């Protein structure tokens, strides 16, 4: 009885980890896109980076 429970817990943890990773990736892409747009809109911003 405890073995299937452990498996389900592991699967849940795995899904949570994947969700967190994808969330970070999405946030990173969003930030880079925003920065890219900002740089494109204002070329002088390159000096700050």
Image (cartoon, rainbow, N blue to C red):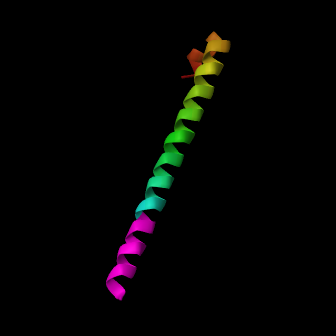
Q: Which part of the image, by quadrant, shows the N terminus?
A: bottom left
The image shows residue 38 at horizontal and vertical percentages of: 65, 20
Of residues 18 and 43, which is closer to you in this image?
A: 18
- Residue 8: say if magenta: yes
- Vertical relation: 26 (above or below) 34: below
| Span highlighted in magenta in the image | 1-13
State the residue at coordinates (63%, 27%).
Answer: 34
The image shows residue 25 at horizontal and vertical percentages of: 49, 41
- Residue 22: say if magenta: no
The image shows residue 32 at horizontal and vertical percentages of: 55, 29
Image position of 36 (left or right of 21): right
Disc count in the image?
0
- Vertical relation: 32 (above or below) 38: below
State the residue at coordinates (44%, 58%).
Answer: 17
State the residue at coordinates (41%, 73%).
Answer: 8
Of residues 13 and 31, which is closer to you in this image?
A: 13
């Amino acid at each position: 009885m405890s073995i299937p429970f452990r498996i389900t817990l592991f699967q849940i943890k795995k899904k949570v980890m994947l969700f967190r990773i994808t969330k970070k990736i999405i946030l990173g892409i969003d930030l880079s896109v925003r920065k890219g747009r900002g740089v494109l809109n204002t070329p002088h911003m390159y000096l700050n980076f």
